[in-house]
Image (cartoon, grey):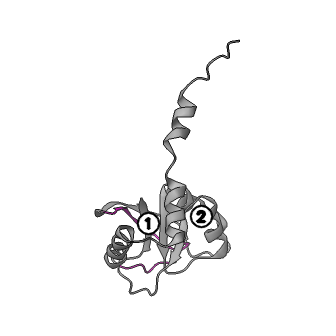
Amino acid sequence: MKIAFATNDLVHINAHFGWAKQMAIYEVAPEGYEFVETLEFGGDLKEDGNEDKLVPKIEALSGCTIVYVSAIGGSAAARLIRRNVTPIKAQSEDAEIDDVLTRLVQTLNGSPPPWLRKALQQRVKPLDDDLETELEPEEATV
């Protein structure tokens, strides 16, 4: 699963979602994690009330399961949740991305909490769904 982090320095979870100029993206699995890419955002991101600034971020995170932030507004959180991206507020702006990723891998190898199991299930399509859409229905014979 892909996890995003709102960050100012690519080390800490220290950026407000709407104001973040960078999002660090990682792929996380029970075997470990690896850095995928850094998404860059420009413009006047601190302009409060400007909902348009959220659109590129929300679209860029559509493949992610979780986004960690230092803070997030209600509107942005609701829009992410509608796209099956779970926003999580970091415990502090000193929280390090590597520490959170290490704990997340440990959680995946143990017993993930219900919210994480649900988020993971939303990302995994059953194989039967793919088969039904690929196969043409047979004509009924009488």
Please report the residue visible at 43 percent of the width from the left and 81 percent of the height from the top.
Answer: 14
Please report the residue visible at 42 percent of the width from the left and 78 percent of the height from the top.
Answer: 13
Bin the neighbour count of mark 1 within 10 Å (Cα to Cα): few under 14, some 14-19, many 20 and up.
many
Residue 94, placed above or below residue 83: below
Is the C terminus in the top left, top right, bottom left or bottom right quadrant? top right
User: What distance separates the C-alpha of mark 2 from that of mark 1?
Assistant: 12 Å
Residue 38, placed above or below residue 140: below
Q: Nearer the viewer, residue 44 or 102?
A: 102
Magenta span covers which residues?
Answer: 12-30
Q: Specify whether residue 42 is in view.
A: no
Bin the neighbour count of mark 2 within 10 Å (Cα to Cα): few under 14, some 14-19, many 20 and up.
many
Position of residue 130 in the picture relative to residue 8 (left or right): right
In magenta stretch: residue 23: yes
Q: Amino acid at mark 1?
A: Ala
What x and y, as percent, mark residue 134?
53, 29
Residue 30: image quadrant is bottom left
Q: Amino acid at mark 2?
A: Leu
> Are the two marked residues, 2 and 1, in contact with CB atoms closer than 8 angstroms?
no
Q: Which residue is mark 1?
A: 4
Q: Specify whether residue 96 is in view.
A: yes
Please report the residue visible at 67 percent of the width from the left and 13 percent of the height from the top.
Answer: 141
What x and y, as percent, mark residue 76?
62, 69
Q: Which mark is residue 80?
A: 2
Q: Which mark is residue 78?
A: none
Q: Nearer the viewer, residue 112 or 36?
A: 112
